[in-house]
Amino acid sequence: MSLEERELEVLIGPQHPASGHMRLVAKIDGDIVVELRPNIGYVHRSVEKLAEVKKYLQIIPLVERPSLADTTANNLAYVMAVEKLLGIEPPPRAQYLRTLLAEINRIHSHFYGMGIHGVMIGSSTAYMWCFGDREPLIELAQELTGARLTYSYIVPGGVRRDLPQGFEDKVEKVMRYLENRMPDYFDLYFNNPVTRARLEGVGVLTKEDAIKLGVTGPNLRASGVPYDVRKAEPYAAYPELDFDVITEEAGDAFARVMVRVREIQESIKIIRQVLKKIPDGPILNEKYMKMIPPNLRKQVEETGHIKFPGVFANLRVPAGEAVARVEGGRGEVVFHIVSDGKMSPYRMRMVTPSFRNVILFEHLTKGARVADIPAIYGSLDYFPPEADR
Amino acid sequence: MAVERTIRHIKALATGAKYMLGGHRLTLMYPDDIQEFPDGYRGMIEYDWDTCIKCGLCAMVCPADAMKMYVSKEESEEGKRPVRRPGINYTRCIFCGFCVDICPTNSLKFTKVHDVAFYTFEEQIYPPERFREGIPKPQYDKEPRRVRAVLDEKRGIRYEPVE
């Protein structure tokens, strides 16, 4: 390197720089980032191509895998697209149960993102707290679905399990716990002058740029755009629930964190409403309920655990196309399924929020300091496997 | 501004001190403590040899090709035609529980054991004859304490011993 050359290329990654394998190629001039290009694709798992050789029900666990913390959104969006093709609607109780799990998942997905962000900017306490407080929510979801993260809970026509006994009390306890704990989060982390200094005014995304770049989820709302699929195109039980779309005006890293915090509080509100309003009734579409043998149907009513009808093994979906979208924890999840009437989709397209947000790495870091790279990275709640699919 | 910052610094430190002395711990001390899972937990799978009708739905629905139909030797020789029964491969199983949910005779059941730790690769494959013998019992150096997760308003999660 000669003296005239001022720029230095720094490679960050690909061995797990933060929340997954990716490489950031940074050109720096002194302490200033001239250009930063995200180099993605290290954890590509070919979900879309694999879906073409798997049967419709087998794709449910597959689409959950890319997003470790935000599995319900993918599960729900995929099943909604399949249901559109099948022309069936889940019963109201199933709609509420879907909403319940989606909101529990949103809270722990936000905690996950905030925790990773915390440790990136050097606050390992925030990391420990967020990951610790994820645990009660995971415990709730485990009781409802039987698994910690990859729930595979939503199936065409309904959900797999009814509410367990005494579940409402447990949910209420956890919600109160989160509310009690929130002030301590503010004292120790969000209002901590160190955190403020690291995040305020860092990586500012203007409203116009956010719209132009096609950013989604909390990152979009932190720039003052009140867009939320739950309101724009309501699905599941959301049309019957009362909640606000959270926005912040500043558009900096701190605003993005604040949107997540306030969305957690909003989710608590939604969960309480869901448990209050949840109607009685079946949790699987009548069409499939009838296909379950009579002795098993009795068992389903007693235990609340659905038995799949035999037709689920080789579910055939009528030919056609369907698009479904869902607001996940990280943003909008879109599924486009093209069916030719066979047992596997002809083509499945999966658009994940992280893939749409990855452009921000290049946009937000221009002119920032090197130490701001992790502060910006973390604030985007970017998850490489989800973007690479 | 400087005053406010100082106050916030002090608040942050005070909160830290409160938790340091308050003993707010969420960690499960595995393997000294082992968590008992709630009912309906999707763990390793048990197989009932007698009620199975060998329909093969479990193998058909399995998303990871973990559940497969194996030719059952003894029965095939007796009946002079191939009889197939399900077997499971724990190197592939993702614990989605689709096989259990689709089984029309409840021959497959969840257990609450999730210790999928084996010495060899071959040990993880359960052909029907081994599958019927049930799941391996986890072995411990020292008998661990069994705990249950209790959700709590103040502590979030507590692990209480089970008798």
Image: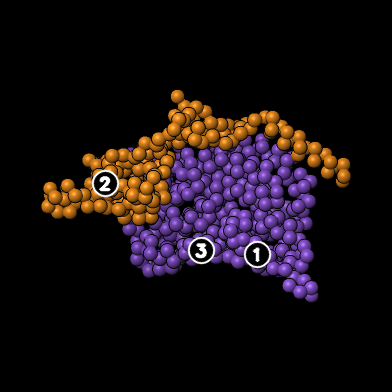
What secondary structure is found at the residue carrying circle 3?
Answer: loop
Give the colour in which the image draws chain B. Answer: orange
Q: Which mark is residue B128?
A: 2
Say left or right for B54 vs A375. Answer: left
Residue located 74% across and 57% down the image: A371
> How many callouts does the rendering have?
3
10 Å neighbourhood of mark 3: few (<14), some, or many (≥20)?
some
Q: Are marks 3 and 1 in contact (CB under 8 Å)?
A: no
Residue at x 37% of width, y 41% of height: B110
For the residue marked with disc 2, what is the amino acid? Pro
Say left or right for B123 vs A367: left
Q: Are marks 1 and 2 on the same chain?
A: no
Name the residue beneath numbered marker 1.
A11
Q: Name the chain letter of the residue that bears numbered label 3.
A: A
Label 1 to label 2, Cα distance in Å? Answer: 51 Å
> Do the residues at discs 2 and 3 belong to one chain?
no
The residue under label 3 is A44
What amino acid is at disc 1?
Leu
Rendered hue of chain A is purple
- Under mark 3, the amino acid is His
In which quadrant of the rendered image does the N terminus of chain A lie?
Answer: bottom right
3 or 1: mark nearer the eye? 1
